[in-house]
Image (cartoon, rainbow, N blue to C red):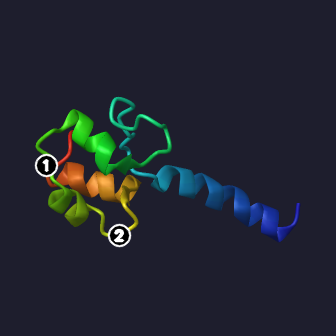
Amino acid sequence: MTLTKKLLTPIALLTALAVPAFAQDPAIDINGDGMYSFPELQAVMPEMTQERFNSLDTSGDGLLDADEIAAGVAAGVLPG
């Protein structure tokens, strides 16, 4: 086994463990892409405004990724 292979296995394991212990809610993530869009969130949270969504979308890509969702849950803005 090469040094690269010896290092990649533990790195892959640590990477898998570093993913937040938060799974996207399939009732919100309708298309199953692992991210929340504004329409997906607003369908289950009618009080969600575009302004609030934009404040959660720190990357500005129009989608909430796992880190942004976890931050929203921690802030009590998104359901856990």
> Going 39% across and 53% down the picture, which residue do you hit?
66
Neighbours of disc 2 within 10 Å: few (<14), some (14-19), many (20+): few
Q: According to the image, label 1 marks what residue?
A: 76
When asked about the image quadrant of residue 56, the answer is bottom left
Left or right of 77, for residue 68: right
Task: Identify which amino acid the numbered label 2 is placed on.
Answer: Gly
Coordinates of residue 67 in the picture (x, y in percent):
36, 58
Q: Where is residue 43 in the image (x, y as percent from the top left)?
A: 25, 36
Examine the rendered structure and indicate whether residue 66 appears above or below residue 45.
below
* Above/below status of 25 relative to 78: above
Q: Which mark is residue 17?
A: none
Q: Taking 8 as reference, is 68 left or right?
A: left
Q: Which residue is drawn at 46% across and 52% down?
A: 19
Q: Quick check: marks 2 and 1 in contact, CB under 8 Å?
A: no
Quadrant where the C terminus is found in the figure: top left
Q: Where is residue 69 in the image (x, y as percent from the top left)?
A: 31, 52
Q: Residue at x 55, y 57 (%)?
A: 15
Q: Name the residue under label 2.
A: 60
